Image (cartoon, rainbow, N blue to C red):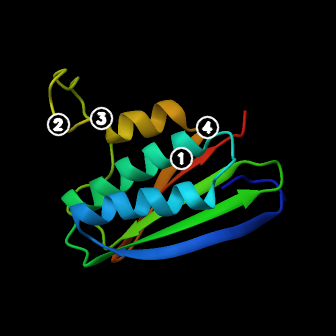
Amino acid sequence: MRDDAMSIRLLDKAVFPATEAAVGEARRWMRKILHGHPRCDDAVLLLSEAFTNSVVHTRSPVIGTVVLMEEDGCVQIEVIDDGADTMPSACRHSPDDLAESGRGVRLIRALSSRWGFSEENPRCVVWFALDPR
């Protein structure tokens, strides 16, 4: 979140089962919420990456998602799970071109204007913000 006093409103929130099949459902949900937003495609991609990380790295039965909009059009997305034994981070090594994993946090870092995570036992919230420009 930004430190200034910018107004932020909740666009929507949802809870999905922590399954691979729910990743597609979460993408469709995000696309509907942000339809027409200039960063909709980036939001869908990054939600997919963060959600998949939760499915793979946590034992959460469900994964929560929250979409917030700042008055300047910046969108912030949060993915909430029950935490894991590891913390979210970019892979220290470059993933092989054909690897099926290892790019999620790298993509979030590259495409978002801000990102981070917080741990509030037992919850972990990974969030990222996308400026409309």
- 3 and 4 marks in contact (CB < 8 Å): no
Instruction: Give residue 70's position: percent from left, percent from top.
Output: 76, 56
What number of labels is visible? Answer: 4
Picture residue at 61% right of the left edge, 61% below the top: 33
Marks 4 and 1, the one that precedes in the sequence: 1
Residue 118 vs residue 129: left or right? left
Instruction: Give residue 29's position: percent from left, percent from top.
Output: 50, 63
The kind of residue tagged 3 is Arg
Picture residue at 19% right of the left edge, 72% below the top: 59
Nearer to us of marks 3 and 1 is 1
Secondary structure of residue under mark 1: helix
- Residue 43: mark: 1
Residue 39 vs residue 24: left or right? right
- Residue 100: mark: 2
Distance of mark 2 from mark 4, alpha carbons?
25 Å
Residue 19 vs residue 51: left or right? left
Q: Is residue 123 above or below residue 37?
A: below
The kind of residue tagged 2 is Glu
Marks 2 and 4, the one that precedes in the sequence: 2
Secondary structure of residue under mark 4: loop
User: Can you identify the residue that label 3 sits on?
Assistant: 103
Mark 4 packing: few (<14 Cα in 10 Å), some, or many (20+)? some
Distance of mark 1 from mark 2, alpha carbons?
20 Å
Residue 65 vs residue 37: left or right? left
The kind of residue tagged 1 is Ala
Secondary structure of residue under mark 2: loop
Distance of mark 3 from mark 4, alpha carbons?
17 Å
Nearest the eye: 32 or 110: 32
Q: Quadrant of the N terminus?
A: bottom right
Q: Is residue 36 above or below residue 19?
A: above
